[in-house]
Image (cartoon, helix red, strand yellow):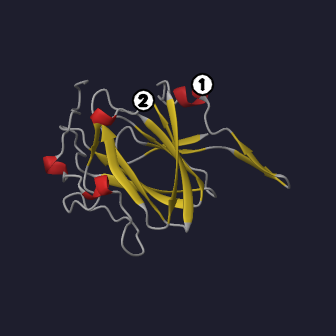
């Protein structure tokens, strides 16, 4: 696996080794030992799988204490994956970074606690997988407005986004319930 740091400390772009031949391909999508060499030592306890159509935008989501680390990838189609630093005291607080993840490039993104996460679908249809280090907890689920002008994410949308009712109501970053602070654990 090739692992690259991103502009946001802790967020990693992961490119697995893909072995292709006339039958198709083979790759390791998760190898605990290899990822531990890059500092990803958390135990993943839940896998999620979503399917969405073009211009569906899911996010920006996070959970408060204890939070969730995520390892995400697109297995069908193509998405624009976005992470936003929501760690108070971070030099990159409120900044975002985006990555094109697709079935073709097979890239993954590691999203640590303290980052909001979301994606929009660039292809006609996409399926997205998330490995999470904590179980989904509805009472701890939070979100930030996808279109917060202070964050200014360029979602690469071709038209209006398709949003859940919940995502339509997410607050802006300055009004969000943030529990993450540099150097302080929940």
- Is 110 on the left-hand or right-hand side of 64? right
Please give the name of the residue rendered at 14% of the width and 49% of the height, measured from the top-left corner: 174
Q: Position of residue 121 (x, y in %)?
A: 48, 62
Q: Residue furthest left?
A: 175
- The disc placed on residue 33 is 1
Q: CA distance from mark 1 to mark 2?
A: 22 Å
- Is 110 on the left-hand or right-hand side of 61? right
Q: Position of residue 100 (x, y in %)?
A: 49, 58
Question: From the viewer's perspective, is the residue at label 1 or at label 2 nearer?
Answer: 2
- Dot 1 surroundings within 10 Å: few (below 14), some, or many (20 or more)? few
Q: Secondary structure at mark 1?
A: helix
Q: Report which quarter residue 155 is drawn in.
A: bottom left
Q: Quadrant of the C terminus?
A: top left
Q: Quadrant of the N terminus?
A: top right
Q: As displayed, is residue 28 above or below residue 92?
A: above
Residue under numbered circle 2 = 135
- Whether pointer 1 and pointer 2 mark residues with C-beta atoms closer than 8 Å, the reply is no
Q: As displayed, is residue 77 above or below residue 13?
A: below
Residue 66 or 110: which is nearer the viewer?
66
Please give the name of the residue rendered at 25% of the width and 46% of the height, measured from the top-left corner: 92
Q: Report which quarter residue 91 is drawn in.
A: top left
Q: Residue furthest front?
A: 165
């Amino acid at each position: 696996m090739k692992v690259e740091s991103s502009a946001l400390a802790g967020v990693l772009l992961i490119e697995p080794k893909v072995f292709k031949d006339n039958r198709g391909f083979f790759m390791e999508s998760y190898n605990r030992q290899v990822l531990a060499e890059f500092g990803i030592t958390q135990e993943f306890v839940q896998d999620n799988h979503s399917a969405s159509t073009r211009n569906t935008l899911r996010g920006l989501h996070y959970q408060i204490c204890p939070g969730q680390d995520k390892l995400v990838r697109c297995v069908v189609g193509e998405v624009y994956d976005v992470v936003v630093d929501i760690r108070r005291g971070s030099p990159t607080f409120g900044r975002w970074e985006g990555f094109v993840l697709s079935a073709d490039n097979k890239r993954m993104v590691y999203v640590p606690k303290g980052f909001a996460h979301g994606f929009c679908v660039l292809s006609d249809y996409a399926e997205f997988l998330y490995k999470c280090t904590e179980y989904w907890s509805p009472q701890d689920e939070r979100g930030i407005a996808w279109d917060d002008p202070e964050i200014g994410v360029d979602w690469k949308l071709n038209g209006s986004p398709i949003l859940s009712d919940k995502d339509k109501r997410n607050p802006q970053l300055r009004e969000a319930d943030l529990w993450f602070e540099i150097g302080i654990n929940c």
